[in-house]
Image (cartoon, rainbow, N blue to C red):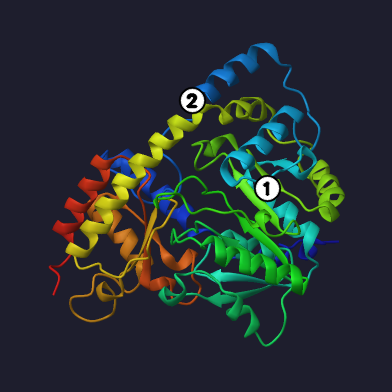
Amino acid sequence: MDFSGRLKVASRAAVPPFHVMDLLAAAAERERTHADLLNLVAGQPSTPAPVPVREAAKRALDAQVLGYTVALGIPELREAICGHHKRFHGIDVAPEDVVVTTGSSGGFLLAFLAAFEAGDRVAIARPGYACYRNVLTALGCEVVELPAGPESRFQPTVQMLERLDRPVDGLVVASPANPTGTMLTPAELAALAGWCEAQGVRLISDEIYHGIEYATPMQHSSAWETSREAVVFNSFSKYFSMTGWRIGWMLVPERLRRAVDVLTGNFTICPPVLAQYAAVEAFGDATYDECDGHVARYAENRALLLAGLPRLGITRLAPADGAFYVYADVSHLLGEGAGALAADSMELCHRLLAETGVATAPGVDFDTEAGNRFVRLSFAGSPAEVAEALVRLEAWLPEPR
């Protein structure tokens, strides 16, 4: 008897793809065939891990067995992370508050499973990072999108939450945000954290771009400065330039610790061990100095784009307070009529890559309604690459009217 008809793909897997990955693959092919790629699509630093981290990894390869560690991370790394929060945010964090994760993405899955039931309503800003929406959907949560535009600097507000027709069980915020680079002020984040705790709403605060910001002095703050009921994410991927090492961490409220411990032990046993030992060295003065040098380069690139794009007629830009992205409205280049370069931003990005070698990300990943009008440009590369990208764009785009 043939039972093959019973074999199926689970409905929870029916989430949209992360289209940036398709553009990354197309960019790699462009580099292979033309060797002229200017990569403004990748959401990652173009630099290797800091020197002290790489040296620590070499030592660990020789000196450590690199077998399983405790599920929540090696004690010396958890203690070092506490010191980082004291240095960056002025807050006291205990090692038992810290869970080391397989990248911040692994932490999202742990937190969402520990904090939310299937059917719970979780709010996110639109535009926002696609994987929040897609992972929550795969887990059976109802994603409530909060339309956020220039009037709120693309960030959610307490007022948006209070206007909802039904209450939510959770809220995900990111500051600096992907794709817009905008930041919540300390007062705005405190207001959201305080409101969530008072209303019994679980706040998930994505703080992985902390340290990459352009105000002087820096304006970052942590949700844990206001509420220890929030789950806070951070990562070694962005500021510390360690994307492929797949190592991050989260600060976990006491009531969720056992659930997270059990889940991570079942999912991954422990975070990547070589990365754990190496990451201990991410918190020395030499490493901070090296990473701050990267941020200075990002600031130069940011200035090039914020000055250069308006000269090309691309004038509607998110403020880019932090991270390394410019989010641009390109609707004036789109449409079906004469003079339009593409029907939507997805087609525009593919055409731009094929005809100029400049790789960018379509906004459809980040905004389910208006994203077809936007592109995201990453400025994590070199100033020379950003300057050349502007030269190619100027030659390719129609003259501004």
Q: Which mark is residue 286?
A: 2
1 vs 2, front mark: 2
Secondary structure, mark 2, is helix
Please name whichever residue, 375 or 172, is drawn nearer the observer in this view of the structure. 172
Indicate whether 53 appears above or below 308: above
> Which amino acid does the dot numbered 2 rest on?
Ala
Q: Is residue 80 in sight in this rendering?
A: yes
Percent position of residue 193, x then y? 66, 65
Which residue position is annotated with label 1?
Answer: 106
Percent position of residue 169, x then y? 74, 72
Tell me which corner region of the image, top left, top right, bottom left or bottom right, holds residue 393: bottom left
Q: Is residue 137 in sight in this rendering?
A: no
Q: Are marks 1 and 2 in contact (CB under 8 Å)?
A: no
Image quarter in which the N terminus is found: bottom right
Sequence-wise first label, 1 or 2: 1
Q: Residue furthest top?
A: 62
Please name whichever residue, 41 or 222, is drawn nearer the observer in this view of the structure. 222
Counting other residues with Cα less than 10 Å from the Cα at mark 2, is it few (<14), some (14-19), or many (20 or more)? some
Residue drawn where x is 29% and y is 45% of the image: 300
Please name whichever residue, 40 or 345, is drawn nearer the observer in this view of the structure. 40
